[in-house]
Amino acid sequence: MAENKTQQTDESVAKFLEAVEPEQKREDAKAVCAMMERLSGHPPKMWGPAIVGFGSYHYKYDSGREGDFLLTGFSPRKSAISLYIMDGYQDRGEILSRLGKYKTGKSCLYVNKLSDIDLEVLEELILDSLAYMRATYDTT
């Protein structure tokens, strides 16, 4: 069975964040990093070349495929900051209605800049996701 393409690495999170451009995105990325570390209780680790993750969980699909992935994390991409809310957005309409300007994918929340959103609401969203993941999966 194939392994996940995105694996945890020993690369430096600080070095990665210092290279983020432009400066405002770098500052936003550092703020998200500090927030996720505080909320998750896990230190930041690089996952692949461009994702900063916090903690991990083990999954196993009905097909037999299984693996480990980050519990929560983010990536300061060129177009937006991608925030990984691993259990998705089901039943989160009320929280999202208070967040501000964002877009979503399956497990990603895309934010252009932190000033576009309410950071207290983002914290609530992350905490809600972490609680769900910890109740559902074997997490570290």
Image: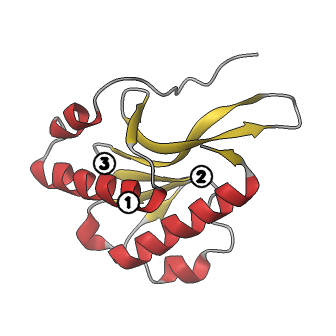
What is the secondary structure assignment of the residue under circle 1? helix
What is the secondary structure assignment of the residue under circle 3? loop
Q: Which mark is nearer the camera, 2 or 3? A: 2
x then y, percent, for residue 25: 20, 52
Q: Spatial distance from mark 3 to mark 1, Cα to Cα?
A: 26 Å
- Residue occupying image coordinates x 58% and y 60%: 130
What is the secondary structure assignment of the residue under circle 2? loop
- Specify the farthest residue to the top: 1
Q: Which mark is nearer the camera, 2 or 1? A: 1
**Residue 100 seen in the current view:** no
- Residue occupying image coordinates x 51% and y 76%: 96
In primary-sequence order, the first of circles 2 and 1 is 1
Q: Spatial distance from mark 2 to mark 3, Cα to Cα?
A: 20 Å
**Residue 45 seen in the current view:** yes
- The disc at residue 86 is 2
Q: Quadrant of residue 118?
A: bottom left
Q: Spatial distance from mark 2 to mark 1, Cα to Cα?
A: 18 Å
Camera-side residue of 131 and 66:
131
- Residue occupying image coordinates x 44% and y 42%: 53
In primary-sequence order, the first of circles 2 and 3 is 3
Q: Which residue is mark 3?
A: 79
x then y, percent, for residue 124: 48, 74
Q: Quadrant of residue 5?
A: top right
x then y, percent, for residue 88: 62, 58
- Residue occupying image coordinates x 33% and y 24%: 11
Other-residue count near label 1 (Cα within 10 Å), few / some / many at <14 / 14–19 / ≥20: few
Apparent side of residue 104 relative to residue 65 in the rendered image (left or right): left
Other-residue count near label 3 (Cα within 10 Å), few / some / many at <14 / 14–19 / ≥20: few
